[in-house]
Image (cartoon, rainbow, N blue to C red):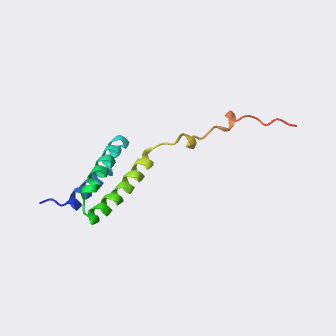
Amino acid sequence: MITVTAILNAIEAHAECAIVPELRCIKKEVMQLRPSLCPDDQEHADALQLKLDRLISDQIVVPDDVVVEPGFQPAMQAA
């Protein structure tokens, strides 16, 4: 018989190389599964949720991180 811990571990291993849309789907499924778990497995699911959040944020490119070339910045005017 496969345990819930083994299933959560398999999900975690698969998530390591998943892309953002798949990670979001996995996260949603774990959230739906969580209420039916025993307290120990709920803690494991919570930890997995945190890891999924980190994996998602690691793959998302934030536009604020874009480097602007010095030649494109407005020149300061002398007063």
Picture coordinates of residue 19, whole percent (x, y): 35, 43
Q: Quadrant of residue 5?
A: bottom left
Picture coordinates of residue 15, whole percent (x, y): 31, 50
Which residue is depicted at the point 34% across and 46% down? Answer: 23
Assign the C terminus to one quadrant of the image: top right
The correct choice, above or below, for 76 with respect to 29 in the image is above
Which residue is depicted at the point 37% across and 52% down? Answer: 52
| Total numbered circles | 0
User: Closer to the camera, 47 or 18?
Assistant: 47
Which residue is depicted at the point 40% across and 51% down? Answer: 53
Which residue is depicted at the point 27% across and 62% down? Answer: 41
The correct choice, above or below, for 79 with respect to 48 in the image is above
Asked whether residue 17 appears in the rendered view, the answer is: no
Assign the N terminus to one quadrant of the image: bottom left
User: Closer to the camera, 31 or 10?
Assistant: 31
| Residue that protrudes farthest toward the right in the picture | 79
User: Closer to the camera, 6 or 39?
Assistant: 39
Asked whether residue 61 appears in the rendered view, the answer is: yes
Horizontal relation, residue 24 to residue 6: left or right: right
| Residue that protrudes farthest toward the left in the picture | 1
| Residue that protrudes farthest toward the front in the picture | 35
Picture coordinates of residue 56, whole percent (x, y): 40, 47
The correct choice, above or below, for 52 with respect to 38 in the image is above
The correct choice, above or below, for 39 with respect to 17 in the image is below
Picture coordinates of residue 18, whole percent (x, y): 32, 46
